[in-house]
Image (spheres, rainbow, N blue to C red):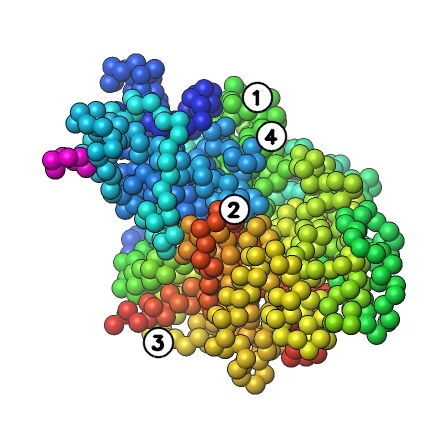
């Protein structure tokens, strides 16, 4: 099995896995970083969203061999970023979570949105968050929390 | 973890055990580190008999943290916060130092009403309200008694606040300082509970205790469990429910690196092939390379279109009578123009919780340990014991945080746990995590049954329903389960007629009957159970009647409701006020939709502002009025309704159905079965709670029934069409 050098949350990590293994499962099982969630395996729900070179990416369909030297940021590391922290804080302040399982992916999608669009409209929110399923349907508070985080970010 | 103590140790201590950390703190550190009682006894020199084991519900640690056990699963509904609020309030505990833990399976944690440890029927707060308040009050009484003894006063000379007891002359002691003395005090048989004005936490908007770890990736769900030496298993399930493996060629599967074993296992119905690997990915890869010859000859192949034909025919024949009142012939005397004949179709619905189903089991020969996000700990514990040839008390059952459930983790036949146990049995000594992929979940059955309603309504001269004949066709959820004795009477499963036969509307001549066909598709309760379909039928028909009568939808409902339906009257009154600012001044292209429904003892009324965008309903806002008795945590009630109505929109999704063709489920994943995304849910939901000091009723299920009828009632105003077939493929 090949060995891969990864840059995750600013740290170098090395894994030896089958080249077809999706990034999601490398994170969860090889690196024990379980904050990134498995929901569907076909990029339909967004629970596995990470940032790959700053772009919100479904880690369940990215084979580890395709990652290359692009930096990876996960829910475990997003709080080190000012926007990331603001979004997490807004999520707590608005009491968004219910079962919470999808929220890692929701937060990663929201951070990516706010980094590119600091003052999003409802339409921007619907587009950027449009591929993330929350089965509890906490969507109204997700909208509120994004707007609240946007107001906090200087 | 608590569960290292056997069930007997829990059981022989009776119902209420409140114990406290030993003064040394030794006991507490062991509690945290998960060592054994015996180890503690050796280190600390304290004989185990004199040490209070981690108490069943409350543990006061020397650092002032108060650990409260939650006697049921947390899977989003918020009990992990609301139940501790009840206890902490009566105890006068410092809320900022409260830690909540999900209790393992044990008799002590059974639902006081249901008699098994479970979450369901929106019973968590309703059934444990009194229990958790009393636990808190008794704990406080013991702390007061300990302080009184220390200061040689009577307890009534002391008072409590924020985890401190205050005595005369400026004396004070923290709960942590009093804990070990208090533990030796007798548990009072009775205690006075606070009157409503004395409550400090209950009734106040309180944020969830589990928010931060769910926002930073640190919360561990069942699927996140990682144990030393653990293996991961997936199972190839039969393409048709109940089919058996004839033969399997597994060479290619075994060739994948990391695959440890491939073997046939019994399922709740039929058989399957388990693949055990070091990790999930090789297990899933290997499963896709199995060549299995299934014996499909002996199993019935359900087919949705054939079932609809059959259900339509059945609906035209007399069934088992659920209710008959008034004159059965009254309907026949109504002239055709004054009649509505309506047929409704509801498909199979999967629950599809975000966290795929999973269970981890380690079998050690004479005992087993289980980790599962279960709504049914007692039932699942017994099932695991049965498969492994153990007694239930030899099965330590940890309750794991679960990523949603909506009924899917409350399964009478415990098929997930049985599957996991069958695998663990073969891998004796090795922990093995069974993972259902999303495909297993979507295709795996245990759906909300498909239903057909045929309703004939005769309208009286006053525009109100004079006669109503209602037939419901659908599989019984509870027939053949342990619940049958409670739910099935005279061939009628009340979980299918709830919301119709017990309607709060005045219908003088009313006849309700059912057919329960047997179909080879496993079915299960789906959040709000029978109300998922009955509320839709009732509330769309009532709306149609109101429209025909040219009446205001709120006023018409109020007129038709029985006077004794107090909660529904109160929510309609509140809805009328709360929606006044927007209800009658909608922009062009928007329409109002109204519904109201009582379920699980909670009254709900809903008004929505809907337009049509991209050929789908766009819900600009929803205003909800709720009467759930005392709202223990109003923030949690608001959460349940704000989001629960979005969950209810599942029914209206264009691809919101499971269908079968020749026995095979046609959807595989979230591409074929599509639950609501952010654009499908209401953009904003304002929730208004009727002030009440009545006993609390549930809020997990009652949001679901109201939304889909309200939305299609609005659509009907926009298009002039009535929508009676779900899912809503087109408008």
| SS state under label 2 | helix
Extreme residue toward the front, this view: B563
Taking A24 as reference, is B246 above or below it? Answer: above
* Mark whose residue sits in front, 2 or 1: 1
Q: Let me know if marks 4 and 1 both belong to one chain.
A: yes
Q: Quadrant of residue B116?
A: top right
Distance, label 2 to label 3, CA atoms, is: 40 Å
Answer left or right for B606 relative to B229.
right
Mark 4 sits on what residue? B383
Of callouts 2 and 1, the N-terminal one:
2
Q: Is residue B355 visible?
A: no
Taking B536 as reference, is B126 above or below it? Answer: above
Q: Let me know if marks 2 and 3 both belong to one chain.
A: no
Answer left or right for B18 relative to B429.
left
Mark 3 sits on what residue? A119
Distance, label 3 to label 4, CA atoms, is: 53 Å
Quadrant including the N terminus of chain B: top left
Chain label for disc 2: B
Name the residue: 54% across, 38% down. Answer: B118
| SS state under label 1 | loop
Mark 1 sits on what residue? B390
Mark 2 sits on what residue? B281
Q: Is residue B147 visible?
A: yes
Q: Nearer the viewer, residue A59 or A145?
A: A145
Q: Are marks 2 and 1 in contact (CB under 8 Å)?
A: no
* Mark whose residue sits in front, 2 or 3: 3
Residue B34 belongs to the span the image colors magenta: no
Name the residue: 48% across, 46% down. Answer: B695
């Amino acid at each position: 099995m090949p060995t891969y050098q990864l840059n995750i949350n600013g740290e170098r990590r090395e894994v030896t896995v089958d080249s077809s293994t999706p990034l999601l499962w490398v994170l969860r099982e090889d690196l024990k970083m379980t904050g990134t969630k498995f929901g569907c395996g076909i990029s339909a729900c967004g629970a596995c969203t990470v940032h790959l070179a700053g772009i919100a990416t479904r880690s369940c369909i990215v084979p580890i061999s395709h990652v290359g030297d692009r930096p990876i940021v996960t829910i475990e590391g997003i709080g080190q970023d000012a926007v990331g922290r603001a979004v997490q804080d807004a999520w707590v302040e608005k009491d968004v979570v219910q079962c919470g399982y999808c929220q890692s992916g929701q937060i990663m999608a929201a951070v990516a949105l706010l980094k590119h669009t600091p003052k999003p409209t409802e339409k921007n929110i619907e587009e950027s968050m449009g591929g993330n399923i929350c089965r509890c349907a906490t969507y109204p508070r997700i909208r509120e929390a994004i707007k609240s985080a946007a107001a906090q970010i200087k | 973890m608590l569960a290292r103590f056997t069930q007997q140790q829990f059981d022989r201590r009776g119902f209420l055990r409140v114990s406290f950390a030993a003064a040394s703190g030794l006991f507490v550190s062991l509690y945290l580190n998960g060592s054994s009682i015996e180890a503690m006894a050796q280190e600390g020199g304290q004989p185990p008999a004199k040490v209070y084991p981690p108490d069943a519900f409350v543990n006061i640690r020397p650092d002032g943290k108060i650990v409260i056990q939650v006697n049921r699963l947390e899977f989003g509904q918020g009990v992990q916060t609301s139940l501790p609020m009840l206890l902490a309030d009566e105890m006068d505990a410092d809320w900022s130092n409260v830690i909540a833990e999900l209790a393992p399976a044990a008799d002590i944690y059974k639902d006081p009403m249901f008699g098994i440890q479970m979450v369901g029927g929106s019973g968590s707060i309703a059934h444990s309200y009194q229990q958790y308040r009393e636990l808190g009050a008794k704990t406080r009484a013991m702390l007061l008694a300990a302080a009184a003894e220390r200061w040689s006063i009577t307890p009534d000379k002391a008072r409590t606040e924020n985890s401190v007891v205050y005595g005369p002359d400026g004396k004070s002691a923290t709960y942590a300082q009093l804990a070990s003395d208090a533990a030796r005090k007798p548990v009072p048989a009775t205690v006075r509970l606070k009157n409503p004005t004395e409550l400090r936490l209950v009734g106040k908007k309180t944020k969830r205790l589990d928010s931060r770890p769910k926002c930073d990736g640190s919360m561990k769900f069942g699927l996140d469990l990682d144990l030393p030496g653990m293996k991961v298993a997936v199972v190839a399930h039969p393409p048709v429910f109940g089919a058996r493996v004839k033969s399997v060629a597994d060479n290619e599967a075994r060739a994948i690196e990391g695959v440890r074993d491939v073997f046939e296992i019994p399922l709740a119905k039929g058989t399957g092939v388990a693949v055990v690997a070091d990790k999930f990915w090789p297990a899933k890869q290997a499963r896709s390379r199995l060549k299995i010859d299934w014996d499909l000859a002996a199993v019935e192949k359900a087919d949705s279109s054939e079932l609809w034909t059959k259900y339509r025919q059945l609906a035209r024949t007399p069934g088992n009578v659920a209710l008959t009142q008034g004159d059965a012939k009254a309907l026949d005397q109504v002239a055709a123009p004054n009649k509505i004949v309506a047929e409704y179709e509801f498909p199979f619905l999967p629950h599809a919780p975000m966290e795929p189903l999973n269970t981890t089991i380690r079998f050690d020969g004479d005992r087993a340990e289980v980790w599962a996000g279960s709504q049914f700990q007692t039932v699942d514990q017994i099932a695991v014991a049965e498969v492994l040839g153990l007694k239930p008390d030899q099965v330590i059952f940890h309750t794991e945080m679960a990523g949603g459930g909506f009924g899917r983790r409350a399964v009478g036949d415990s098929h997930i746990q049985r599957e996991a146990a069958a695998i663990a049995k073969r891998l004796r000594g090795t922990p093995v995590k069974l993972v259902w992929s999303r495909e297993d979940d979507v295709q795996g059955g245990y759906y909300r049954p498909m239903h057909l309603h045929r309703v004939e309504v005769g309208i009286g001269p006053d525009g109100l329903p004079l006669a109503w004949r209602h037939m419901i066709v659908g599989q019984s959820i509870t027939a053949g389960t342990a619940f049958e004795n409670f739910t099935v009477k005279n061939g009628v499963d009340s979980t299918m007629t709830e919301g119709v036969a017990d309607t709060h509307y005045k219908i003088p001549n009313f006849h309700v009957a059912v057919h329960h066909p047997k179909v080879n598709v496993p079915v299960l309760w789906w959040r709000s159970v029978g109300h998922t379909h009955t509320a839709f039928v009732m509330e769309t028909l009532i709306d149609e009647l109101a429209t025909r009568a040219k009446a205001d939808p709120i006023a018409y409902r109020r007129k038709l409701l029985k006077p004794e339906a107090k909660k529904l009257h109160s929510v309609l009154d509140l809805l009328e006020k709360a929606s006044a600012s927007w209800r009658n001044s909608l922009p062009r292209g928007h329409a109002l939709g109204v519904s109201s429904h009582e379920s699980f003892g909670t009254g709900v009324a809903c008004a929505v502002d809907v337009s049509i965008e991209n050929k789908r309903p766009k819900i600009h806002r929803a205003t909800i009025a709720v009467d759930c008795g005392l709202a223990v945590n109003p923030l949690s009630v608001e959460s349940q309704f704000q989001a629960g109505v979005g969950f209810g929109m599942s029914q209206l999704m264009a691809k919101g159905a499971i269908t079968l063709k020749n026995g095979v489920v046609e959807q595989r994943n979230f591409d074929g079965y599509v639950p609501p995304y952010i654009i499908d849910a209401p953009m904003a939901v304002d929730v208004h709670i009727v002030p009440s000091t009545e006993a609390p009723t549930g809020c997990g299920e009652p949001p679901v029934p109201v939304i889909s009828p309200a939305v299609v009632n609005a659509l009907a105003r926009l298009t002039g069409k009535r929508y009676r077939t779900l899912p809503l493929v087109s408008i």
